[in-house]
């Protein structure tokens, strides 16, 4: 399948699932995943769902607890997404989880989606294939309207069966918690599980995670100093662009050529690497606010926000 090879090369492929059309990228390729955010015009790095073709493939990515296994056995393939504890050795790009130590996984119930995953031979990170803020696409034509030629392929299999996104459960802890209502009902889930599912919040279906929860994303231990034009003693430098101040200490350049897709792909890993050196602080050079810069700056501002 040509689309599988395109994914392997780091290109984007839009594909049908039983819920809505997804915009897929190789979940292990940070640069490809950054391309998803660019194509969608997403102003924030929301974590993405990883699509796999078997429970076994999910287990290579995440720890599947006995309760999570029962849910997977009952509903996969299907419109149930499980948030699970990420295996550190899974080589899922940090941009997929937005730096969290959990990962959302599901096995879609659609022959084309499953064929694509098999052909690609890698887990596929995919949000709904619409521009940020628009409604989710239930037809290939919606994808083309919203995303133009950003995907190398748009696989057309007609209207999606559910037309509603998957139900998302947090199954990373002891209690199973509803994060987003969706195509699989709570009644069906509680019947399969034999216990009550905790409702996380009164959040609307399209706003599953409150901004407050997103603020708890991995933040470096070292304080971030934004829009830095020079480096103070003891600081590490997170640079951007060609015009880097003279600095003898630790330095990572998000993109020496000022490429925002490359910068987004490098962001989380760069923060982790600099933080691991235990600097007094991390000076961050200004990143332009346009394109993916908005999401990069959103993440940096969250990382720099006062700690509780
Ligand atoms: O039906 C669907 O779920 C579609 C198809 C393409 O699979 N996908 C979809 O993706 O709706 P998206 O990006 O529109 O919504 C994914 C949501 C994120 O906004 C976030 O709320 C949640 O999944 N999510 C992903 N990873 C998470 C994590 N580690 N912890 C909590 N929530 C997570
Ligand atoms: Mg969406």
Image: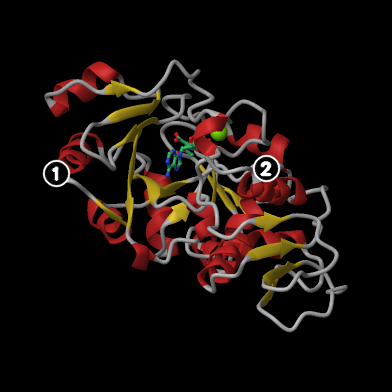
Pick whichever, 173 or 231, lies toward us: 231
Query: Residue 159 appears at what percent x and percent y?
Result: 51, 29
Q: Residue at x 58, y 60 (%)?
A: 222
Q: Residue at x 81, y 72 (%)?
A: 257
- Left or right of 285? Residue 13 is left
- Identify the element where label 2 is drawn: helix
> Mark 2: few, some, or many residues within 10 Å (few <14, many ≥20)?
many
Residue 217 visible at all: yes
Q: Which residue is mark 1?
A: 66
Pick whichever, 131 or 241, lies toward us: 241
In contact (CB < 8 Å): disc 1 and disc 2: no
Q: Which residue is mark 2?
A: 40
Query: Residue 138 appears at what percent x and percent y?
Result: 54, 29
Q: Residue at x 83, y 80 (%)?
A: 246
Assign ligand 2 to one image quadrant: top right
Query: Residue 89 appears at what percent x and percent y?
Result: 35, 68
User: Number of marks in the image?
Assistant: 2
Q: Is residue 119 above or below residue 173?
A: below
């Amino acid at each position: 399948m040509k689309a599988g090879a395109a994914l392997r090369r780091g290109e984007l492929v839009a594909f049908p699932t039983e819920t809505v059309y997804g915009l897929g990228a190789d979940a292990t390729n940070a640069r490809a995943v950054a391309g998803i955010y660019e194509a969608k015009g997403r102003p924030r790095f929301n974590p993405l769902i990883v699509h796999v073709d078997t429970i076994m493939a999910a287990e290579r990515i995440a720890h599947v607890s006995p309760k999570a296994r029962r849910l997977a056995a009952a509903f996969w393939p299907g419109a149930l997404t499980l948030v699970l504890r990420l295996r550190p050795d899974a080589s899922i790009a940090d941009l997929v989880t937005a730096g969290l130590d959990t990962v959302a996984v599901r096995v879609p119930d659609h022959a084309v989606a499953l064929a694509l995953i098999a052909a690609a031979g890698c887990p596929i990170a995919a949000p709904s294939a619409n521009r940020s803020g628009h409604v989710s696409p239930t037809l290939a034509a919606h994808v083309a309207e919203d995303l133009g030629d950003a995907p190398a392929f748009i696989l057309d299999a007609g209207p999606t069966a559910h037309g509603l996104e998957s139900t998302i459960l947090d199954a990373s802890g002891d209690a199973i918690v509803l994060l987003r209502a969706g195509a699989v009902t709570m009644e069906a889930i509680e019947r399969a599980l034999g216990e009550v599912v905790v409702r996380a919040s009164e959040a609307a279906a399209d706003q599953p995670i409150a901004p407050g929860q997103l603020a708890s994303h991995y933040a470096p231990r070292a304080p971030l100093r934004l829009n830095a034009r020079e480096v103070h003693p003891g600081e590490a430098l997170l640079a951007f662009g060609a015009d880097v101040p003279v600095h003898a200490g630790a330095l990572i350049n998000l993109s020496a050529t000022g490429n925002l897709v490359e910068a987004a792909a490098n962001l989380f890993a760069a923060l982790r690497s600099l933080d691991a050196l235990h600097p007094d602080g991390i000076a961050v050079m200004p990143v332009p606010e346009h394109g993916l810069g908005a999401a990069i700056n959103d993440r940096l501002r969250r990382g720099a926000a006062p700690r509780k």
